[in-house]
Amino acid sequence: MTGALMGAEMGEQPAVLARFVDRFDAHRDLVRSILPPQLAGIVFVARGSSDHAAVYGRYLAELSAGRPAGLTAPSVHTLYHAEVDYEGYLVVALSQSGATPEIVDVCARLQGAGARTLAIVNDLRSPLAGAVEAVLALDAGPERAVPATKTVTAEFLAVAAVAAALGRVPFGREDLERLPAAVADVLADPAPPEELARRWADSERLFVAARGLLLASALEGALKVKETTGVLAEGISAADLRHGPIAAVGPGVPVLVLDGGGPPAEDLRELAGLLRGRGAAIAVCGSGGAELSLPGSVPEALAAIVVIARLQQLAFNFARIHGLDPDAPAGLSKVTATK
């Protein structure tokens, strides 16, 4: 049956997250043990789905640390050979396989430039794990479907542990304990994303819009749709969509709005109303009767992880409705060896 691997690996996510939650405090303490004495900032290094976990980490890290946080451009170091002083910085490299050459190379260069280095990987025997000072292991088990699922949600939780090591985070221990069950509840309710996939089955493009902590989820959800179906899906900030890109949103163009509550909620609701006025096909992923429902007990910061499970379901159903195998999208491989 097509999608057997992706479907099974999606289903493993509650157990993977529960294992990480059990070790969350130990992971947090490990990060604290390598922090520079005077933290200047945090820089994330990643590609692909891991880059989206890095975007999420960039938001959480700056909120918790009160220090600048951002994503490095690997090409600045691998192609342009920039000489940058990274003294006082924590560099967090994310790679599910730990085998992408440029991520290993950049991490080594930044460590040589004075940074303290941490890797988030699924394979502790990987080159990246051997190139850094400390490693947070995802412990997600082998992932054989080309679209990453369980490793992505585990990466998001791992960067939340990094943020917790830096300062106060917008979730508590009880919220963490409830997270695996919230993802399990979403996975046990496959009908809404299947219905939405059928409604939008003839669409050749769509937008996934969010703001703040859920922007990373929008980017990841759009990538999952693109790589499993070839549909041109774009994850975009709700604020950016209001500028030039809104010209591409008209009658019948699908827009999925991600609303995890928190400070962006009112802006997202206003955006949904604006887009409906333009005739766009709007659906909302959120709590309170949304087309793609979410458990109401999860705070915005962790809702970013639950939303990803919903969007994985959407991409999975899109692919199967189009007669495609989401396990093995054409032209893609599990490890992309960029340099």
Image: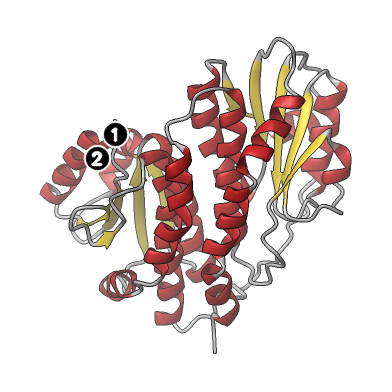
Question: In this image, 242 relative to 72: left or right?
Answer: left
What percent of the width, then of the height, locates residue 127?
87, 48
Q: Quadrant of residue 213?
A: top left
What percent of the width, then of the height, locates residue 241?
32, 39
Q: Amino acid at mark 1?
A: Pro
Q: Is residue 198 in sight in this rendering?
A: yes
Name, please, the residue furthest toward the left: 277
What percent of the width, then of the height, locates residue 197?
33, 72
Mark pair 1, 2: CA separation: 6 Å
Task: Please tell me which residue is depicted at 40% across the width and 58% down the height of the picture.
Answer: 182
Location of mark 2 (residue): 268
The dot on residue 273 is none
Question: In this image, 323 relative to 47: left or right?
Answer: left
The N terminus: image quadrant: bottom right
Q: Nearer the viewer, residue 330 or 171?
A: 171
In this picture, is 22 found above or below 253?
A: above
The dot on residue 264 is 1
| Badge 1 element | loop
Q: Amino acid at mark 2?
A: Leu
What percent of the width, then of the height, locates residue 265?
25, 37
Task: Please tell me which residue is depicted at 65% across the width and 34% down the height of the picture.
Answer: 28
Task: Please tell me which residue is depicted at 28% across the width and 40% down the height of the picture.
Answer: 261
The C terminus: image quadrant: top right
| Badge 2 element | helix
Q: Are marks 1 and 2 in contact (CB under 8 Å)?
A: yes
Question: How packed is label 1: few (under 14 Cα within 10 Å), some, or many (20 or more)?
Answer: some
